[in-house]
Amino acid sequence: MRFAAEWLVALRARAATAAVAFVALLSAACSSGAAGAGSCGKIAACGGDPTGTWSLVNSCMVPYVRTASAEWCSGLVYDPKEVRDGLFLGHEFLPLSSLTITYGADHNYSALFGWRGRETQYFPPACLKQHGVLAPSCSDLAAAIEDKTQTVLSNVSDVVCDPTTDGGCNCAYTVSVEGAGAQPHVPELGTWRIDRQDSTILNHYPGTSTPAYPADFCVNGDTLELHGHNDTGLITHEALRNLTLTRQPDPAPP
């Protein structure tokens, strides 16, 4: 990812396009269970043949900064009819929830990453009534935001807003992203090569990118382990450090 760059991406909820913004998509824990921030260890790299299709067993990531709006109210404009387009819902941490990656014998690869997590956003009372209307109840606000999930906030679901003691609303919601950047369900494509000087390093060349994203790797039977070489990000995702994958069976012949 170089995930600021690579994008769990800014999908801004704007009239005609938008959605939720994502910039750096990763985190401080293992997606399949616990692991503290910065605790991603190295692997015993052994090399091997990575060709085939692999799916996620677990992963480990390092911390990243919350994505947020520069606008004090996160772009919320609530009028008597609806929440208007332009709302920006930030995220603290989206765990890697799914991954399927295929390393072809032709040295092309295809990787479909999925990210999913429960997030929160606080709206202070002044924000709720800044446009001269009565502040909505938190349940009304949740319903209005939920309406937007059918259009411009399509990566958001299950919105619940609860009142706070100061008269604001604290909203929780689920964010789901799958695919390359802002393109849902579109895999990341690139080429791969085993390093000529170190056969335990698997180099990834995403898209038209020239520099390689090297990974220490080990194929052991039906298990593939990857670790960002020298503790760098894996396959353009800067905060993703470790992957453990399991081999998928070859499809049955027609």
Image: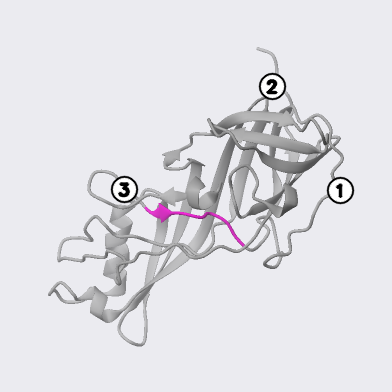
Which stretch appears magenta?
A: 20-27
Q: Nearer the viewer, mark 1 or mark 3?
A: 1
Q: Of helix, strand and loop, which one carries label 1?
A: loop
The residue lying at 37 percent from left, 49 percent from top is: 11
Q: How many marks?
A: 3
Q: Which quadrant holds residue 248?
A: top right
> How far apart are the two marked residues, 1 and 3, measured between alpha carbons?
43 Å
Please name the residue that numbered disc 1 is placed on.
44
Vertical placement of 100 versus 129: above or below? above
Q: Say whether disc 1 or disc 2 marks the residue closer to the N-terminus.
A: 1
Vertical placement of 246 versus 23: above or below? above
Q: Amino acid at mark 1?
A: Ala
Q: Magenta stretch mostly in which secondary structure?
A: loop
Q: Amino acid at mark 3?
A: Ala
Please name the residue that numbered disc 3 is placed on.
18
Vertical placement of 137 versus 212: above or below? below
Of 221 and 25, nearer the camera is 25
Coordinates of residue 54 in the picture (x, y in percent): 70, 35
128 lies left or right of 101: left
Disc number for residue 251: 2
